[in-house]
Image (spheres, grey):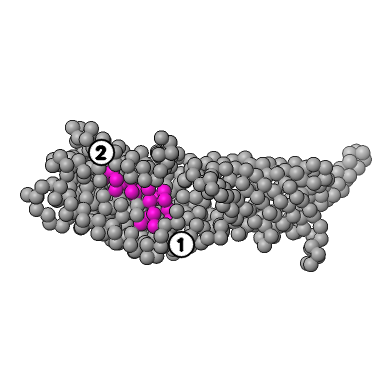
Amino acid sequence: MQEWLNHPAVQSGLAPFVVALLAAELLRRLCLSGLAIIAGFAVTVYLASNFSVDPLTATRKIVWLGIASSLLGIALIWFNGSLWRPILSVIAAAAAIWVSLRILQQQPLGVAMQWGVGCALYVGWLVFWMDDLRDAPVRAGSAGVALGLGTGGAALFGGSALLGQFGLALGAAAGAYLTILAVTGSRLPCGRSFTLSLSLIAGLTGCLAVLTTQLPWYALAPLAAIPLVAQIPVSEKLALWIQSLSLSVATLACAAGAVYLTWRVAGAPPF
Amino acid sequence: MLKRNTIAVLLLASLPLAAHATETYTIDPQHTYTHFSASHLGFSTTHGRFDKSSGKVTLDRAAKSGSVDISMEAASISTGLGKRDEHLRGPDFFNSAEFPNVTYKSSAVKFKGDTPSSVEGNLTLLGVSKPVTLTISAFKCGIHPMNKKYLCGADASAQIKRSDFGMKYALPNVGDEVKLVFQVEAYKD
């Protein structure tokens, strides 16, 4: 059993998928199916890493920010307002700086500024545009699958299995959510507990992969396009599984682009 | 009064002698490397080393004491395969972007007879400090035959568990037990 749980495909694929599937279905009545994302991600962290705090490394900051963002997502159900979207983006941008701070401190000021601003813009952008999908479960689910798999695949090719697993876990969890939606033909509750935690973790993971692995910065561009591509017009009259499929094909093309760009630079993963 | 002054003068006169007893050495980076080895999936043992090190060593043979302070650049890791080295530098292993140095600071040097036999101290890796004792298997001081400078050299080793330092990637497939071998040469200042 332990040997089975040590397998990377179980840790970042099967386990988060199954846990997210259960979480999305069980929390449906409470309108908290969006927590499937953090449930899937947390099981991967538990199996592949840990929930330690000291020393507070960049990857550990991502884990704790991800958990905090899902709780914030729940809290914001009762505090709805149009201002939250830009506010969350600014907070996410600041979080990106905080996560990469120790790495930036090792660099000359010019390089640190460039990297810091780039990371902040990327994470802020993702949070801003994914927030637009919070009331559109099919679009959010499709974007989530692509953003997770694209970030994970690119990080894996860039040279970090752990960051790769973080991204793939998000993709698997969003895939579980989308599977329930497509199979049952009924819309699951989504909300910020889905979009905020997914976009924040994926954004920070992509950013950290650029700073610490061979993932080229421009591979983040197709990933940044995913929330926009997920808004392409698809008829609401179509069956949910057809809508999911159409949007997933479009968004996964962006994810494939990011993985391809990384592979061009870094070659095959070193594992 | 005279007796007290005499004692004070004698004490003062002995100070330079005590200061001279402690010798300070600067590590020669061209002959100082930290080697490591760990099991690769249980099939074989992978060896590697840090190519860049710096630091100081002090030695007081009369008092049988000393100190060791070595810093290794995590990014200088080398296993003979560039792709693997990139992976080892990354967040899965040594995370050199966040933790650029691996350090060892001694707390005590033990002697057997006139030569140091072990060093007690703390190894700091990935921001985590743990006590590690180095066993010295070879130690020699003398004049370098070519440059005629006085130097000391030693081989020392220790066994650590990488998981103790938070390096948990690919456990248990890639071995948890890591053997460290320090090859140190240092010139007298």
Horizontal and vertical percent for residue B19? 80, 50
Q: Residue type at mark 1?
A: Leu
Label 2: few (<14), some (14–19) or many (≥20) C-alpha neighbours in 10 Å:
many
Of pointers 1 and 2, the one earlier in the residue sequence: 2
Q: Is residue B17 magenta?
A: no
Q: Which mark is residue A21?
A: 2
Q: Residue at x 36, y 42 (%)?
A: A10
Marks 1, 2: nearer the viewer: 2
Q: Residue type at mark 2?
A: Leu
**B158 vs B140: above or below:** above
Quarter-wise, where is residue A13 in the image?
top left
Q: Is residue A107 left or right of residue A230?
A: right
Give the alpha-carbon distance from disc 1 to disc 2, as whole Å: 45 Å
A256 or B143, nearer to the observer: A256
Q: Is residue A150 left or right of residue B31?
A: left
**A175 vs A259: above or below:** above
Horizontal and vertical percent for residue A35? 26, 39
Label 1: few (<14), some (14–19) or many (≥20) C-alpha neighbours in 10 Å:
few
Outermost front residue? B43
Q: Is residue A235 left or right of residue A256?
A: left
Outermost right residue? B2
Horizontal and vertical percent for residue B76? 56, 59
Q: Which residues, given as a range, are shown in magenta? A: A154-174
Q: Which mark is residue A109?
A: 1
Q: Is residue A170 magenta?
A: yes
